[in-house]
Image (tube, helix red, strand yellow):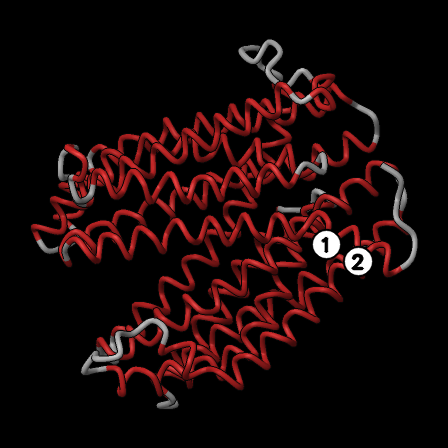
Amino acid sequence: MPAPTGLLANARAVLVLGLPLVGSHVAQFALHVTDTIMLGWYSVTDLAAGALGATVFFVLFTLGSGYGQAVMPMVATAAAAGDDTEVRRATRMGMWLSIGFSLLVLPLFLLSAPLLGLMGQDPDVARLGGGYLSIIGFGMAPALVAMAVKSYLAALGRTQVVLWATVGGVFVNIGVNWLLIFGNAGFPELGARGAAIASVTVQVVTLAAMLIYAVNLRALKHYHLLQRFWRADWGALRQVNALGLPIGGAMLAETGLFGASAIMMGWFGKLSLAAHSIALEVTAVFFMVHLGLASAATVLVGRARGRGDTEAVKASALAAVLLSLVFAGVTVLLYLLFAEQMVGLFLKPDDPERDAIIPVGASLLMVAALFQLADGGQAMAMGLLRGMQDTRRPMVIAAVSYWLVGLPVAYGLGFVAGMGGVGIWLGLTAGLTAAAALLHWRFWRNL
């Protein structure tokens, strides 16, 4: 894997790796969207139960996914150094830890119905949400192991299969949802539980497709990915855990900040919360691009590190950062020019509250012009630091930035200064900006 030379060559390398990963992230987001739409067509109660269950699943998945994501820089570095054994060990132990985490949290899913009831949820929503979670909990293991296999394939430059496996999963999800949510073609009508079965099916099918590819592709056979899978490698396991747990912790800190912002927006009423949710959906779509580019940066920096080529680390990082900035600039223009139209896409034309929600959502997207630059910047910095296998200090930086900067500023501007939802979003931007600045400073200082 020779290092590309020149800014354009490095930018091309980032795009070749990153664009399929961008597509896979967008496809993953589409799974959430299709579940929301199809459950909404079925019933409001099932939609609420599915949304609640999906949120619980996502929070736990976020923490556990750090193990799979740790595989990416380790494999990229080992492959560049020509260490096939380390490639196999890192991936295998990432899969082990993913399975172990899934078994550890499974009781939470199985006991979720009474737990949701104790949290004060509507009895019908708690019952349906508990049924949803008791099923989707069995999808945690294939989902997390699939993350490890995706990281393995991406680190070795096989990002196209990651894209197509995820896109295929969207169509499987739609098909199984149609059969089991609504009870079509003679299948039982299961509502939210049908959506949970569809999600587990997608996770199993996606994992199977990528494993078949990874094990049987001639160019990858020399890694013997599943060779003596049952044998532990405690050194590699400790290394994956040391890298992966902070990755999951940093992601959980960010997820928690956005969860707290939703709670605060809810204090302003349902219209503000609806506008907030729509604005976050819009920004999430664009954020997928930054995630894909950051993953590509992780791989390229990891490869350069494996070769011991500091100049290539700098060149790959610079190209990735510039591409992220260019895309952020384009996104800012879209927000400034089409904010109301984008918010309107999420509301029915005859919705009686449409005219009240659109101005609030559009004002939040005005703030998102700043928000996008900060969010993309912190995502890219995290990707670069992961490529250097530096994750523990970044987790601390992220937690401090989000919870000691972002949350207090959001509350202060939103409630004390009386700026409402715009103030909360400015607080989010402050936290993300602090994280981006400190994380980039750490990466570039240590080169």
Q: Is residue 389 above or below residue 359?
A: above
The residue lying at 27 percent from left, 39 percent from top is 196
Three-letter code for the amino acid on which mark 1 is drawn: Leu
Dot 1 falls on a residue whose secondary structure is helix
**Relative to residue 341, is residue 110 drawn left or right?**
left
Q: At which x and y percent is residue 132?
A: 22, 40
* Quadrant of the image containing the C terminus: bottom right
Cβ–Cβ below 8 Å for labels 2 and 1?
A: yes
Residue that carries the numbered disc 2 in the rendered image: 11
Pick whichever, 120 or 370, lies toward us.
370
The residue lying at 43 percent from left, 76 percent from top is 342
Can you name the residue that lies furthest to the front here? 185
Q: CA distance from mark 2 to mark 1?
A: 6 Å
Residue that carries the numbered disc 1 in the rendered image: 15
Dot 2 falls on a residue whose secondary structure is helix
**Relative to residue 307, is residue 73 drawn left or right?**
left
Q: At which x and y percent is residue 108?
A: 27, 36
